[in-house]
Image (tube, coloured by chain):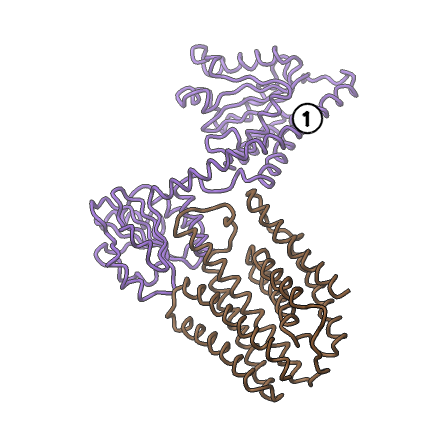
Chain colours: A purple, B brown
Amino acid sequence: MEIICLGLNHQTAPVELREKFAVPDADLAGAAQEVARRQGLGESVIVSTCNRVEFYAVADHAANGLAELGAHLRQRAGEHHYDPSAFYMHRASDSVRHLFRVVSGLDSMVVGETEISGQVKKAYRVAAEAGSTGPHLNRLFQRAFRVAKEVRSNTAITRGPTSVAAAGVELAERIFGGLGQCAIQILGAGEIGEQTARALWSRGVRTLFVANRSHERAVALAEAIGGKAVRFETWTEGFDGIDILICSTAAPHFVLTREQLVPLMGRRIDRPLFVIDLAVPRDVEPSVNDLDGVYLYDIDSLQAIIQLSIEARRRELALCDDIIGRHVAEFVEWIERGSRDAGERRPLSRP
Amino acid sequence: MQQIALALAGGCFLFVFARTMYALGAGRHRRSPANFAVMCAGFCLQTAYLYMRGRTDGRCPTGTFSDMLVFLAWSMVFLYLVIGTTYRLSLLGAFTAPFVLVFQIVASVLHGPERPALPRSPGPFVEFHGAVSMVAYGAFALSCVAGVMFLLHERQLKRRTLHPLFDRLPPISDLVVAIRRLIVTGLALLTAGIASGFLAGSPPAKLAVTAVVWAIYACILLAVQRRRLSARRVAGLAVIAFVLALMALLGIGVFGHQTL
């Protein structure tokens, strides 16, 4: 008996193909049961996310099991959609290693992201509740979650921001610590600005003000996020209470200059101001960063931080693979010991 | 035996510093109970040293500049163990450790084979004055450490180059709060120290030097309370003021014991 995996992901197939094989949440349990009932297959878990669709199963013989999985996919998506070159097939220790890497976020589009761990947990829970898992996949997936935890705890694979919004949040926390007492002012209603504001808002900032040349847009955005709209012409009136300023207007010139900011900062010299300028052309004169207590980050400096953390994560891959390699060896040993002890008495396929 | 205890304490602080820097460099630093335990062990060894020194001299071990430095180092660790854990200031211990180590090394170098003859206990007020003033200097020293941490972190933020070595520094706003609280603590203790010194009839020159240190910190605190200083200036002043305080301590240490 062997653990096998058949799947496709963002590296092997475009979204047009991935979506043909995606399994909706409502169908996950039924599909897993269906796979587990196929000839030569004993247990199964299906992981289906926006970036990957993967079938894990326990098979009497790997080659036959993979052929059965292929047949299942052909039935599901239609013969003409099934392109074997878009799929990867793993067997035995390679399947185990692949799952451990997936759950640890090493196989993700953004290396080290942690969302996949939750998605796989959910897929496993659905399969377990549907009765399509058994001793092998139960042990495999539980070990995978343990491996992911160890990888995250003992390496820097999840460290550093990988999006503009996350970079904004991290920098804000470096300046203010907890964001519970912070107030945000958004200038402009750009999409990235909104995302960044939402990310900060989710960290529990106290107040959020939105100002836009079109006041109606400001009102709409403020209502969507849960903040308050203020007139663009008068936004500086509340400046003393602002901690984070997010600029993303479409103005062709600076909307905030050093000359404007000097007197404003003079009124609140002991209170730092974090300025996130996401506009192109830029909204804020770069020299404001030289003022005491002002921390200005434009889109390029945020991108540079993101790039650094992605590179740092990539440098951690070898260390992560070492941890995973150790767990794979232990798991394979457990499987082999179990097979020896059972003396092939235990049937792998369900009756 | 005394020097062994001091050397072992220094080893503990060196261990904390080196271990933290290594973990930071590798990007794998996490708040560790091991570091805290080693800091506690170092503190116990320092306490043992000061106890033995006190027994030998028959007085509070603040009679020479060398003794003062060890007492100052002890005060820093004591306050770190109280404040660092209370405010959960990440890395404060790791940044305190090298300062403590340097003070102890300088104290050992200055210690020398022959100690000046010191009078036995000069009375409870003088003993209290010496001890409480040194704890006040410890608070100022820790505010200086927090100031250094602030300046390093702020520089990173301004330059937009977030080096992993400084990845786990506390938020700059928390550091400013810590600096302010440490200065308040130091000032309160130094006020008590000056009052007890005055009551004990300490030499006027020594009291005057201490009063100058008090005045410097009082001015900083006043400016902070009146919101006249940016956070960066508060941090910079905390560092400069402690350098001045240390020079004052040197003056008191070199000339003070002759007049006690």
Task: Indicate the position of residue B200 as horizontal and vertical percent values.
Answer: 62, 88
User: Quarter-wise, where is residue A348 in the image?
Assistant: top right
Q: Quadrant of the N terminus of chain B?
A: bottom right
Quadrant where the C terminus of chain B sits is bottom right
Q: Is residue A326 above or below residue B83?
A: above
Q: Residue at x 50, y 50 (%)?
A: B166
- Front-lying residue, B13 or A67: B13
Give the percent coordinates (x, y) of residue A50: 45, 28
Q: Nearer the viewer, residue A218 or B105?
A: B105
Locate residue B99, reporting x and y percent.
58, 61
Question: In the rendered image, is residue A138 in sight?
Answer: no
Q: Quadrant of residue B219?
A: bottom left
**Chain letter of the residue carrying label 1:** A
Left or right position of B153 against B58: left
Q: Amino acid at mark 1?
A: Ala
Residue B48 place in picture, x, y as percent: 74, 67
Q: Is residue A152 above or below residue A222?
A: above
Where, by quadrant of the figure, is residue A154 drawn?
top right
* Residue situated in front as seen by the camera: A314 or A187: A314
Total numbered circles: 1
Looking at the image, which residue is at 48% across and 62% down? B147
At numbered mark 1, what does the secondary structure look like: helix, strand or loop?
A: helix
Q: Nearer the viewer, residue A222 or B153?
A: B153
The residue tagged 1 is A329
Residue B32 versus residue A141 in the image, above or below: below
- Which residue corresponds to the image point at 68% horizontal and 25% vertical from the top-left? A136
Query: Position of B52 compared to B204: left or right?
Result: right
How packed is label 1: few (under 14 Cα within 10 Å), some, or many (20 or more)?
some
- B156 on left or right of B251: left
- Do we see residue A311 in this rendering? yes
In the displayed structure, would residue B33 be above or below residue A306?
A: below
- The residue positioned 45% from the left and 48% from the top of the image is A170
